[in-house]
Image (tube, coloured by chain):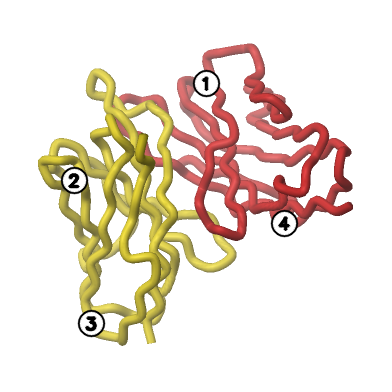
Chain colours: A red, B yellow
Amino acid sequence: AQTVTQSQPEMSVQEAETVTLSCTYDTSESNYYLFWYKQPPSRQMILVIRQEAYKQQNATENRFSVNFQKAAKSFSLKISDSQLGDTAMYFCAFMSGAGTASKLTFGTGTRLQVTL
Amino acid sequence: DAGVTQSPTHLIKTRGQQVTLRCSPKSGHDTVSWYQQALGQGPQFIFQYYEEEERQRGNFPDRFSGHQFPNYSSELNVNALLLGDSALYLCASSLMVQGASEETQYFGPGTRLLVL
């Protein structure tokens, strides 16, 4: 079974600064997908970024980028130019690429606080 | 373009009662997954529905059951409620492509269930 580990329960960053959230995972599969989701206090889970394991290039979405290290099974999220609206819980998630097994396996989350 | 919707937003039940939660997928999506998120934890996969059938199931007892309708909407039913069933229930929709749901899952706002 796959596991996802987020070792930083809480983090804080000042507005306009850069922060990196860590995520490691364990799988024996070679084809899979990784995601970062954001859950603000409104509790809606919002997709931040997606990475396909077969792609060597790291995914980027505006101020959000990932550092995907397949051999190390590491998938960190970098937020540049942090904004107050980035305050939220951030969850790393794994999805198997093995055909029918499409459930998401989540980590325990990192609570990010952006301060003035 | 309507996103994923869920109803009700909040619900209070007593132990032993039964509850039904509803989900309408994002326009164009045909697959619905349900997750349970206990306070302070990451979401846990309950089950997934496609073509009106349960396609995959997580580690949840038979008290948790579901249904998918021809219009792709879905219901989650929980019987004989326990205090431990208190949680945020999230619905996510996606699109099955060539028999494999490797597409990104988009989440609804959730239903907060409190069991007294």
Who's the residue at 56% across and 13% down the image?
A55
Residue type at mark 1: give it. Glu
> Few, some or many C-alpha atoms within 10 Å of disc 4 (few <14, some 14-19, many ≥20)?
few
Do marks 1 and 2 both belong to one polypeptide chain? no
Residue of label 2: B54
Do marks 4 and 2 both belong to one polypeptide chain? no
Find the distance from the CA under tag 4 to the CA under tag 2: 34 Å
Chain bearing mark 4: A
Residue type at mark 3: give it. Gln
Q: Mark 3 or 2 closer to N-term? A: 3
| Identity of the residue furthest to the left in this view | B70
Q: Nearer the viewer, residue A25 or A84?
A: A84
- The N terminus of chain B lies in quadrant: top left
Q: Secondary structure at mark 1?
A: strand
Residue of label 1: A52
Q: Is residue B63 left or right of residue A1?
A: left
In percent of width and height, residue A50 lies at 55, 28
